Amino acid sequence: MSTLEVTTVADGVHVAFGPDVNWTLLVDGEDVTLVDSGYPRYVGAVVESLRRVGRRPEDVRAILLTHAHIDHIGGAGHFASTYGTPVLTSDAEARHARREYLEQASPLDVARNVWRRGALAWTVRIARAGGTESGAVADAEGFDSVVGSVPGGPLDLPGGPVPLDTSGHTSGHTGYHVPGAGAVLSGDALVTGHALSVRTGPQMLPPLFAHDRPREFDALDAFVGLDADVLIPGHGGVHRGSVDDAVRRVRSARA
Ligand SMILES: [Zn+2]
């Protein structure tokens, strides 16, 4: 891990940019909700991102996953086994996190895409980051049973994130709205860049990463009509401006 950037985008909302994936720290008093956790070998960077906002791994009340792909779940097992940190996501995605099933691009899928600009360097980087490891988190649980709340309401976690069902990228993919900060954490359901993309700005990931491409587009509905003007994606930079407009742009680019 050579580069790490941590940026405060709203009060209590800090985004960490690893070289190839982002994670977010929702800080409330001493407590932190960590949304996603990078690749397996980003653990040191995740700990460093906590240090930069004046917190320690022990301050993390839960790791909340957008989804269980290896670039988002990678550090979670370490936190769970070392600090007893709960690892939470939707019920469907918790099964994915426990590796009861796997919806991840295979090395062959990736090999078929090496024609994409930057793909070879990217595959070398992600292999070094532990991208071929399992990442299974045996104790991952659905947030409903642990910090259950009224449907559509906030989870009882620092930052009060509200889950957004955005299944499609994976069967249980979940985004999070942070109403107090006007922020949407879109995970991989809507991104603003990727090593395999030549563009920046709101966009979908390349199709090879999607479990169900049509559903991935349908899921964008979950981001529409929220009180939010900061989009924090799993890959790419923070996008400021109307999230509704960002969704419209992505949909019209597909048409
Ligand atoms: Zn990802």
Image (cartoon, rainbow, N blue to C red):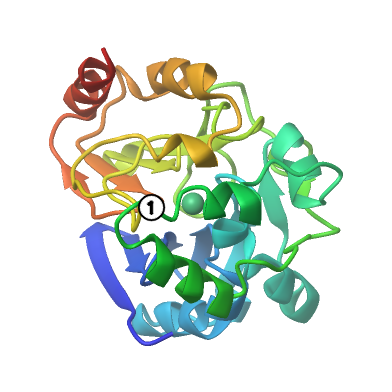
Report helix, strand or loop for mark 1: loop
Locate the C terminus and report the quarter of the image it occupies. top left
**Neighbour tally class for label 1: few under 14, some 14-19, many 20 plus, Cα within 10 Å:** few
Please give the name of the residue rendered at 54% of the width and 52% of the height, measured from the top-left corner.
Answer: 110
209 relative to 138 in the view: left or right? left
Q: Looking at the image, which is closer to me, 71 or 207?
A: 207
Quadrant of the image occupied by residue 242: top left
Residue designated by label 1: 115
- Name, please, the residue furthest toward the left: 241
Relative height, residue 133 to residue 114 (above, below): below
Residue at 58%, 79% (x, y): give it.
41
Residue type marked 1 = Trp
Q: Quadrant of the N terminus?
A: bottom left
> Could one spot residue 106 in this view of the protein?
yes
The picture places residue 4, in percent across and down from the top left corner, at 34, 79
Q: Is residue 144 visible?
A: no
